[in-house]
Image (tube, rainbow, N blue to C red):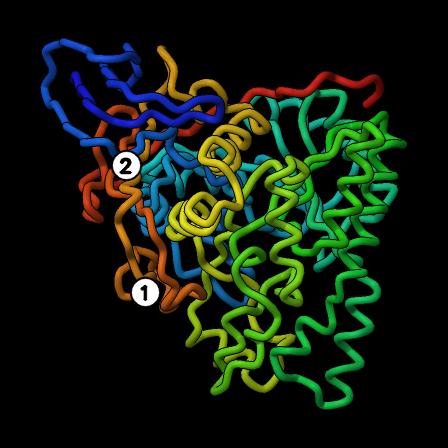
Amino acid sequence: MRLLLKNGVIVTAEETFNGDLLIEEGLISRVGGKIQSEADRVIDLKGKYVMPGGVDVHTHFNLDVGTAVAADDFYTGSVAAAAGGTTTIVDHMGFGPRGCSLHHQLDKYMEDAGRDAVIDYGFHGVIQHINDGILDEMRSMVEDGVSSFKGYMTYDYKLQDHEMKAVMERLGSLGAITTVHAETHEEIHELRARYVAEGKTQPIYHAKSRPVKTEVEAIERMIEISRKAGDAPLYVVHLSSGDGLDTIRRARKAGRNIYAETCPQYLFLDESRYMEEDGNGLKYVMSPPLRERGNNERLWKGIADGTIQTVATDHCPFDLKLKKEMGEKDFTRCPNGAPGVEARIALMYSEGVEKGRIGINRFVDVVSTAPAKLFGLYPGKGSISVGADADLMVIDSEREVTISHKNLHENVDYTPYEGMKVKGYPVMTISRGEVIVEEGVFTGQRGRGRFLKRKPVFKQIKGG
């Protein structure tokens, strides 16, 4: 099928220009001024922005944490992503049975996503334990297209520092990257126990039990572990604090091989949300927690100056009804996570570009191009170039929308961004040359998404 997009303003991470796009067999075949060509469909975009489709490298679809199951599976979650302008996700696989292989979870997630996903997808490996078998298996996982793995410094399957070092050495030798949930487990465990013993079980104590210093200390430890592991690449997920940002900035200036992701919740929301009445503060029980207000603008500056490379969502949607049932009397029992996969693009464009915090090319970089590059998807994804997948989002810069749960496609029963007004909104999403969302209406098919075998993009270090 041939699709011709006319009269758009084409925006990439590097440039902005008026032009047309010709799409053939799911790929971009021509990029230029006035393209004259026969096509099965011609769309006049009338000056709207045409950008690479969004790449969200931190989602949790179909997540089962044992006590609760996320509200979005790979169908509803990917439909929501597409409606918000995202054409590719890289999902963080959840923990499997104790002692399971790395491929156990990959096989399960391949089945789930293959059945349901409407956009293209990849997976981050999840590391629950370390032994020689797991370290050996990493090579075949990378060969199977999983070129990044996540380790946790907290939760039940937390890794000790020597285990993190073994992981980083092995992945570094394969050219793969270690992503890390950076919070110190011991202090958090002690604070949570103390607050519960004192009867301080309201949502605000979720934030108080995970202070900024627990994130900073964990990041510092991981930077040092990376250094000892031959400067193996390190990616910090969901950075939440200005102090954590400063730690990463210093490390990057010193030449360390570290990259950072933040999320909309840490740019738009703050700790005061935990004080909402009638149990509504439980909406924001996520880890790391929301921080004091001053952190928001510090993180924006980190995006602007390049210290933060990507903005993902950590979309982890548990119904508020469930959060209240489980956590109303004790925040420690509330499942962690919040939705955001559909609102990401609109929020970042409106609050970033329209309000002058970042330029439009930087916007494209952090929501699409940089994540595609870091995680082995570029130039097939995250670019507008001849031969790239025709994954595109069209933004109407004049469209004004008030974000509301009732207007979103997410299956969860709330949005943390309820009532926020945005200017500039995705009005069309194209995945591999197929228009799958138009004016908020999804027209694609369940299961049309493809698994993306991601390649390692980092220089292999010695050892492992």
Label 1, secondary structure: give it. loop
Residue 139 spot, x, y in % from top left: 67, 23
Which amino acid does the dot numbered 1 rest on? Ser
Relative horizontal placement of residue 121, taking residue 397 as reference (left or right): right
Left or right: 399 with respect to 52?
A: left
Q: Is residue 210 above or below residue 462?
A: below
Q: Amino acid at mark 2?
A: Thr
Mark 1 lies on residue: 404
In depth, the one of 286 and 252 nearer the eye is 252
Numbered badge on residue 429: 2
* Disc ID at residue 282: none
Element at label 2: strand
* Quarter occupied by residue 185: bottom right
From the top left corner, tell me how far across and down residue 424 is, in percent. Answer: 33, 47
Residue occupying image coordinates x 87% and y 39%: 224
Q: Nearer the viewer, residue 112 or 310?
A: 310
Residue at 29% x, 46% y is 83
User: Seen in the image, is 162 located left or right of residue 239?
Assistant: right
Q: Of callouts 2 and 1, which one flags the residue occurring earlier in the amino acid sequence?
A: 1
- Residue 447: image quadrant is top left
Q: Residue at x 39, y 56 (%)?
A: 72
Looking at the image, which residue is at 53% across and 77% down?
A: 281
User: In the picture shown, does residue 459 fall above or below 152?
Assistant: above
How many C-alpha atoms fall within 10 Å of the one at disc 2: few (<14), some, or many (≥20)?
many
Along the line of sight, the residue nearer the viewer: 399 or 244: 399
